[in-house]
Amino acid sequence: MSPIFPDAQLPSGQPATLGVMGGGQLGRMFVHAAQRLGYVTAVLDPDPQSPAGLVSHHHIQTGYSDAHGLAQLSALCDAVTTEFENVPADALATLATQRPVAPGSAAVGIAQDRIQEKAHFEACANVSGVRCAPHAVIETAEQLKAVSPDLLPGILKTARMGYDGKGQVRVKDLAELAVAWAAFKGTPCVLEKLLPLKAECSVIVARGWEGAVVSFAPQRNVHRDGILAVTHAYESNLPVALSERARTATKSIANHIGYVGVLCVEFFVIDDGSEHGGLVVNEMAPRPHNSGHHTMDACDVSQFDLQVHAMAGLPLPQPRQHSPAIMLNLLGDIWFDSAGQDRAPNWQSVLALPGTHLHLYGKRHARPGRKMGHLNITGADIAGVKATARKAASILGLPGLEDI
Ligand code: ATP
Ligand code: MG
């Protein structure tokens, strides 16, 4: 694909425009990165108050499958990307008949469906060197009956539309499994064996139209109630050999499907009796990821910069991390006191701490569990970053100080 330069004067006389399907916080940070390079941006999201729509030059307020909205987006844009995986894959395929779309509908379609996603991971296991958790697909009553007790206790996950731990339930025996599947109304699911996790990590790569791949170093992630809480991004966050394996595996997972764009792959580090533990691939996100937000302040290019570069056919420089970093997710919970009354987080004290970078997404209403923003902490050394992160977490009343 020939590069779409931000300063190019197209025949229409309009500056180059990049579009994004979805108007959440990831779209907002994409819009900011694109605008910094001089692009005009367009967001398609039905919500008039969507975080990305509020800051974009154009905001098309229709559903993701709306033919008129999609036609408007392709008329406005020189290339289109997506910011969440549940955008209908068909809508991306429609856009791709008119404009370059990265990632493509096939890759997004795989990431949308845990059954296809696991089949993809298994298909490239020989090259990637990692397998997924032992699992069974449950789409029919016969498959439910045939489940091996070896998979229990396990986690039943809906094949589609799960995120932040939603659409998942832990089951300890076959009876609980049957109840859980019925509660999901018999929708296609995957039952995964519950693994003894030592840690979780993820890797973000960017792959270009011609197949060039660059990657960020793996980060270690701490989840609370199924939602990412803390990301540790510095040397020594994970054993080196494990880090290298995760990075290589992610590249081959992207290469296997000719992926174009930014891809995040999440891994479990499991206790398998070995010194550093075994690596198991969990899932992939066809877009920048919450666990890569530290790249905005700790690296010379961020995951959102690379998303812009990849879709527009610009060069993909290998990112360099210049500071150790910790990312603290800011969920809506901290806007409420212990009695459930509204309160304002103490930004004054947090921003007085050196090396803190506050990112808020412009969401009007806080709700428990809702991602409202994140706080990146950078510094000269890891001990200093951890100390500042602990102070910030304590000021904000974030739970789990022991995780930092
Ligand atoms: P995301 O917001 O990352 O898309 P999700 O809702 O799709 O999350 P998963 O990543 O599958 O869900 O699971 C959420 C968390 O639940 C994991 O990060 C991990 O902490 C825990 N978990 C999931 N599967 C397993 C498993 N097989 N064994 C042990 N823990 C698990
Ligand atoms: Mg996950």
Image (tube, helix red, strand yellow):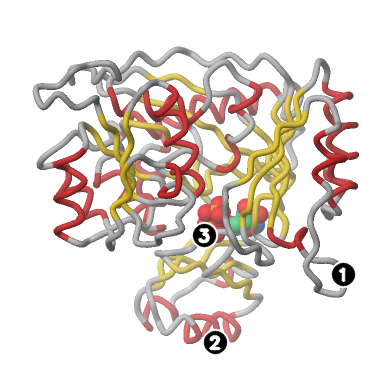
Percent from the top left, x then y, of residue 64? 28, 59
Does residue 11 appear left or right of residue 375 in this picture? Answer: left
Is 94 on the left or on the right of 56, as rendered? left
Rounded to the nearest angstrom, the CA distance separating label 1 from label 2 is: 34 Å
Picture coordinates of residue 143, whole percent (x, y) = 39, 76
Relative to 185, say whether 133 is above or below.
above
Q: Nearer the viewer, residue 33 or 327?
A: 33
Residue at 59% x, 60% y is 364
Label 1 or label 2, whichever lies nearer to me, is 1
Residue located beneath label 3 in the image: 163
Whether ligand 1 has any atom under 8 Å from the Cβ at mark 3 is answered as yes
Up-down relation of residue 237 to residue 3 (above or below): below
Dot 2: element: helix
Name the spot of residue 140 as percent of width and height, x first: 35, 79
Query: Which residue does the image show at 32% across and 23% down from the upper left?
Result: 208
Mark 1 lies on residue: 338
Q: Residue at x 75, y 42 (%)?
A: 273
Task: Check the picture and name the quadrant holding the N terminus.
Answer: top left
What residue is disc 2 on?
179
In the rendered structure, which disc, 3 or 1, sits on the residue that comes first in sequence? Answer: 3
Q: Are marks 1 and 2 in contact (CB under 8 Å)?
A: no
